Amino acid sequence: MQLFNWLTAVSGLCFFLSIVVLIRRDHLHIRYSIWWLAVAAAVGLFGVFPSINDRLASLLGISYPPILPVIVAVLLLLSRLFLADLESSRRSVQLTRLVQQLAIMERRLDKLEKRGQD
Amino acid sequence: MTGAVIIPAYNEEATIAEVIGEVRVVAPELDIIVVNDRSTDGTAAVLATAGVIQINLAVNLGAWAATQAGLRYAVTHDYDFVVTMDADGQHLPSTLPALISRFAEDPEAIVVGECVRRGSRSRRFAWRYFRAITGLSVQDLTSGLRVYGREAIKLLSSREATMLEYQDVGVLLLLRRHGFDIHEVSIEMQERAVGGSHVFRTWLSVLYYMVYTSIMSVAKVNR
């Protein structure tokens, strides 16, 4: 293994461990950790065995193997970003409706309290 | 018929008291619901002594979502109709009787207070453009002075309506899609006395509005 392989393998491992730590400290939902654990595992795997990439590329008919992980990464990132926007649209509607409902409840509570005082 | 006026207010301390006072004189039978969209000026203080139904949003949501809070309040309180109007004095309370009597003729439909004369050349162009791509026959697409009946209030309280960012074209399209007729009554409007439009503060916000409404019109037409 060359130095560069070690570098990728170690960074994959560090990534993996930080995610586990973040889950343990309740900073990251397990729901979102699945994706990041998979990414960390892939980084580590391709770091240790770069030949997997070359074989995969030749299987797919790609003449320049190093471009394969780049293409895959870009596609995955784009889809991830898109899903995040969908999620944030849903959240913003939820937040708006909650704020509206809270304000209405507050108004009703005020009225009830005033009635109670009279 | 029981009715209410819904006024969304964001930093309107200069005009809101006068608007409320005039509504009381013109239409004393109507409840007045003011939705304070987290104003940072003295609007809340003015409202506290105004004796209106005050709904205070904890987060600034924008004019349409604030209006919707009022509509959702109206659903729980069983009003037969509501009138939505601006707090900045642009909509004249003196026009309420004409709008409400038009509504009473056909309570299934909604009524829009129309004043296309107020439009600048670019605004007229925008109206014509949006009429063309949506097929809406309403002249004054951006007027927020409207009367909604029971069914319309229910529809506009829905989650689907929360997805909208502005009260104008999107709301009209939603109403049309659910089979509501839209009548217009020609009325006077006042030039804004204080401050400019909240929606069109910069050229970028105008551009955003145009792109937003174009996409929505194309995506949602006749669905």
Image (tube, coloured by chain):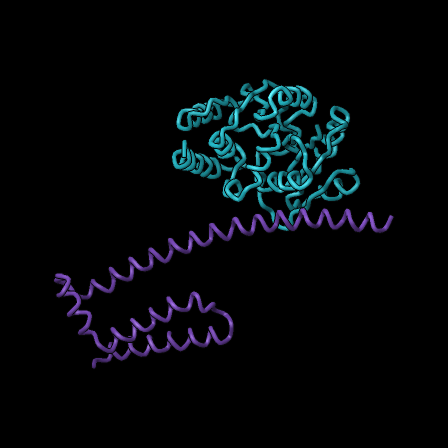
Chain colours: A purple, B cyan
Query: Does residue A24 appear in the picture of this structure?
Result: yes
At 58% from the left edge and 45% from the top edge, which residue is drawn?
Answer: B61
Q: Nearer the viewer, residue B42 or A27?
A: A27
The answer to which image quadrant residue B8 occupies is top right
Along the horizontal axis of the image, is A83 left or right of B3? left
Q: Nearer the viewer, residue B9 or B202?
A: B9
Number of labels in the image equals: 0
At 61% from the left edge and 30% from the top edge, which residue is drawn?
Answer: B149
The answer to which image quadrant residue A63 occupies is bottom left
Residue B98: image x %, image y %? 66, 19
Along the horizontal axis of the image, is A62 left or right of A21? left
Query: Does residue B10 appear in the picture of this structure?
Result: no
Q: Where does the N terminus of chain B fall, quadrant-wise?
A: top right
Residue A26: image x %, image y %? 51, 72
The answer to which image quadrant residue B154 occupies is top right
Q: Is residue A1 above or below residue B107?
A: below
At 69% from the left edge and 21% from the top edge, which residue is drawn?
Answer: B97
**Residue situated furthest right in the rendering:** A118
At 56% from the left edge and 52% from the top edge, which residue is drawn?
Answer: A95
Residue B140: image x %, image y %? 52, 24
Along the horizontal axis of the image, is A90 left or right of B69? left
Residue B74: image x %, image y %? 66, 38
Along the horizontal axis of the image, is B70 left or right of A113? left
Q: Where does the C terminus of chain B fall, quadrant-wise?
A: top left
